[in-house]
Amino acid sequence: MEVEKKRITAIRVSLLVAFIITAFLSLGIGVKDFSLLGLLQGNQEDLYLAVTSRIPRLLSVVITGAGLSISGLIMQTITNNKFVSPSTAGTMEWCRLGVLLAILFTGGKAPIVKIAFAFVISLAGTLVFMSLLQKVQMKNMFMIPLVGMMLGNVISSITTFLAYKYDVIQNISAWLQGNFSLVIKGSYEILYIGVPCVVIAYLYSSKFTIAGMGKSFATNLGLNHKAVVTVGLVIVAFITSLIVVTIGSIPFIGLIVPNIVSMYGGDNIKNTLFDTALFGAFFVLICDMIGRYLIYPYEINVSVIISVLGSIIFLLILWKKKR
Amino acid sequence: MKNNKQKLILLGIVTALVVGVFLFWGINSSNIEFFLPRRMKKIGAILISAFCIGYSSVSFQTVTNNKILTPSVMGLDSLYMFIQTVIVFFFGSKQLVMMSGTSNFLLSVIVMLVCSCLLFLFMFGGDGKSLYFLILAGMIIGSLFSGLSTFMQVLLDPNEFTILQGKMFASFNNVNEGLFLVSLLIIGSVLVVTAKDYHKLDVLSLGADHAINLGVDYKKVVLKELLIIALLVSVSTALTGPITFLGILVASLSREMFKTYHHSVRIWGAVLLGSFALVFGQLIVERVFSLETTISVIINFVGGIYFIYLIVKEQMA
């Protein structure tokens, strides 16, 4: 037990160090020349560049990676199924439908309006999906993501249909592919609202674990199962909406990161919440840097990189779970 | 059996009627020379696609012995698009013409035959895997290939890759008519080659052990069918683009409608159902929605719901 704890701490510390180094390195990638040294010496130009573009980008990457991973972790814990996440339960697709409705009904200039719509729609959608899961007892662990992804496809086709009809397909395509290239000072700060959600998630973490053990078991332990599940889904829907509206859809993160972390860190969400957030931020940061570096000075959307890497990792996890 | 024949004929007549409406809607003596040849090519391409999708889905389900998985759910059409992208990637991005040309098509088909065999081996080789596992893995493999294609397209031309995407791939509103004749040739030879295979498929649906006992050269038949499936998926994807859920729809509907193990009936039933759905759908898209939507959107909507229903039903059973 003691050895195990040491090992986990060692992984955590080395991951943290690697993350911090990478984060600093990421500040240097970009078309305009930028030197960390200059920043430390108080060079005005470097400071301006860092504050308006490079640091906002880094922060939004971190919040996105951490937020999506935690959302995935919460969903996986509540359902006690390793294959549930915002992108395999249709949550992302509901969000996009919400964004579309916001554009159609209000013109959707203000991000807060889009977030509100996305949040309400995705929460409703995810709740419907969860209650469907409870009605149909799914014996096979691959069933839930399968039905979720199919449902996501159906919602997506509704969104595409409406978008074609009202000629906003261009707007909606932008939300299909997440990327950080447009993040500058003033356009991303709304993501900070996600931070309190993470704190709430931490406070509730033990309760999520118990809720995942099943309704009757949780009720026996004196837990209000329904309330806890609802709190979890509200957090997930909110974080996902924030990210979809400000950055765009990003696949697989919520699914693969908690799985990787649980391989070395175990399944107690109270212990692994921080590691999951850290690993998620690190992973998205690496993917973003690959996208910025490969065809410099152009950029590849981070969601493209993630969908390639993510699907490979997902397949590996699938094969491992199969055994 | 007789009843089934009547149903098939009825289905054929209804399909022919819809095709007629599609061809002659708004035609008069002054515009017939302009519209008719174009519409005939389009209808031809759609019918070829319907055949490809119907045949490949039904025979795939028989060969792999399941009722839900189809080639496109397994990611075969994404694989084809990925191969096309790779070919353009390595043979120069400037030759966009090549993308839709016959040489690229034939090269893609050859690579596709090899790659899909590897994919089949990878998915179905080894110990028996659960159906849900296969579907899930297939969907992820599909998203891997389309992710890779997008990735390479961005590398090709970061500025205009969405335009590139539109030009590179066919869709129902943008049928690749240049490949019409080659496809017709391929389909013709497939029809000849498979003419005597329907009975073998009937036996295969009893399962591998029974089929071998009854004297079917199991491995040979399965390999042949899988190669033909890969070929047909290439043809339909090149002509009209990917359409994920049509295969599952027509294969299941045909099974429900004809309730027979005779593949000559089930396959042709699926082909006719597919033709009807595509032509009727395209008619609706062009005339009712005045091209405000695409037929893939409609079919993915209906097919997706049906797919969920099938999975849940299978689970309950």
Image: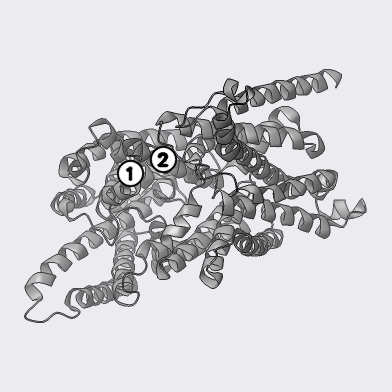
The three-letter code of the residue at mark 2 reads Phe
Q: Position of residue B65 (x, y in %)?
A: 45, 48
Instruction: Name the chain under label 1.
Output: B
Disc 1 target residue: B81
A208 relative position to B273: left or right: right
The three-letter code of the residue at mark 1 reads Met
> Does the image show residue A85?
no
Residue drawn where x is 78% and y is 56% of the image: A231
Residue drawn where x is 57% and y is 35% of the image: A48
User: Which quadrant does the C terminus of chain B fall into?
Assistant: bottom right
Mark 1 → mark 2, Cα distance in angstroms: 8 Å
Q: Position of residue B308 (x, y in %)?
A: 54, 60
B159 relative position to A140: left or right: left
Q: Nearer the viewer, residue B238 or A274?
A: A274
The image quadrant that residue A12 belongs to is top right
Q: Does residue B147 sit above or below A123 in this rendering?
A: above
Please tell me whether mark 1 sits on a helix, a strand or a loop: helix
Q: Position of residue B298 (x, y in %)?
A: 41, 66
Mark 1 touching mark 2, by CB under 8 A?
yes
Q: Nearer the viewer, residue B9 or A115?
A: A115
Picture disc at residue B55: none
- Mark 1 surroundings: few (<14), some (14-19) or many (≥20) residues within 10 A: many
Instruction: Name the chain under label 2.
Output: B
| Display coloring | one colour
> Does the image show residue A119?
yes
Disc 2 target residue: B145
Q: Are marks 1 and 2 on the same chain?
A: yes
Q: Does residue B227 sit above or below A275 in this rendering?
A: below
- Mark 2 surroundings: few (<14), some (14-19) or many (≥20) residues within 10 A: many
Please tell me whether mark 2 sits on a helix, a strand or a loop: helix
User: Which quadrant does the N terminus of chain B fall into?
Assistant: bottom left
Q: Does residue A182 sit above or below A136 in this rendering?
A: above
